[in-house]
Image: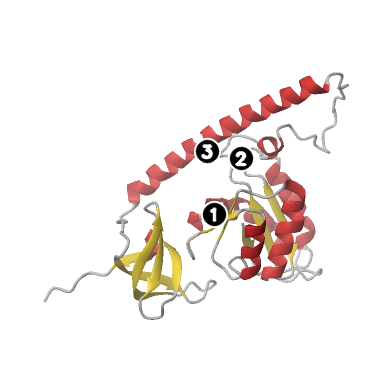
Amino acid sequence: MDFWGPVRTSSQGNRYVIVLTDNLSKYLIAKAMSNNTAKATAEFIMNEFIMIHGAPERLITDNGVHFNNTLMKTITTMINTTHSFSASYHPQTNGQVERFNATFCTQLVKYYDENEDDWDDYLQSVVYAYNTGIHATTGFIPYEPAFGRRQKSPFDSNSSNFTLTQPDKFFKYLQKTRRTILKQAQENISHQQQLTKLRYDKHRKDMSYSIGDLVFLKVCDNRTKLDERWIGPCQVINKTGEQNYFVQDNETGKSTWAHISQLQPVMERVV
């Protein structure tokens, strides 16, 4: 889940789009919002997702204050959802966000450029097109693995009606179909992840770190301008795999999750 914006304020007062993507089906939920506060974020999660689809097992966001706050911690604890944070300024860690920015936002920007004040009127049309188009990674229309059936398009000219004579058999058929779709989607995702990893490993020069190692951390003072600077030394406190590390600044005591590409080792000075 992530925010897109801020952008030019619409006639309805909206400046942001909050986006939530299902990791398996790639099904997308988005809403135009006037702000990106913790309260607005919590209301979106509760009203637009949990009250409709139920509580997720895991929620992945960046470490922004609109996601990492007391209210969000209370909600995720209450609904028994694990809240994971991607490394700051490294959207690749939250892969759904990166792919969303490359596709969905590109379409919305067209309306944003052409319609100065009413871009948010077209938001749900773009969401619909995204959810009913074949996703390159899964090979399926996001709606199908999410709901286990094909969507009846409002633009279908010849839609066939059928009579449901044996609900139990249809329900079993629906379950079997959904299992088949989900299994194939998982295999397709795994294959794409392997290809992505091979391409990444081919060009990467990253090293791995152990708990207790000292590193310098690359940070951005301004997310829009992306002014980079290095702070530290920081100590590695924890890690997940070999990509994400929880580091603590030895001088300030502040800690954060960081992707390995944001770290550089503190080399011992040779006298």
**Could you tell me which residue is drawn at 67 percent across and 53 percent down?**
107
Q: Secondary structure at mark 3?
A: helix
Residue for badge 2: 135
Q: Quadrant of residue 248?
A: bottom left
Question: Where 127 sits versus 213, above or below?
Answer: above
**Could you tell me which residue is drawn at 39 percent across and 55 percent down?**
243
Q: Considering only order in the chain, which callout, 2 or 1, is on the residue closer to the N terminus?
A: 1
Quadrant showing the N terminus: bottom right
Q: Please tell me the numbered disc located at residue 66.
A: none
Q: Secondary structure at mark 1?
A: helix
For the residues labelled 3 and 1, the Cα–Cα distance comes to: 15 Å
Q: Quadrant of residue 239?
A: bottom left
Coordinates of residue 235 in the picture (x, y in percent): 34, 69
Coordinates of residue 75 in the picture (x, y in percent): 67, 61
Relative horizontal placement of residue 252, taking residue 47 as reference (left or right): left
Residue for badge 1: 98
Residue 249 visible in the displayed image: yes
Q: Considering only order in the chain, which callout, 1 or 3, is on the residue closer to the N terminus?
A: 1
The three-letter amino acid code for the residue at tag 2 is: His
For the residues labelled 1 and 2, the Cα–Cα distance comes to: 14 Å
Residue for badge 3: 189
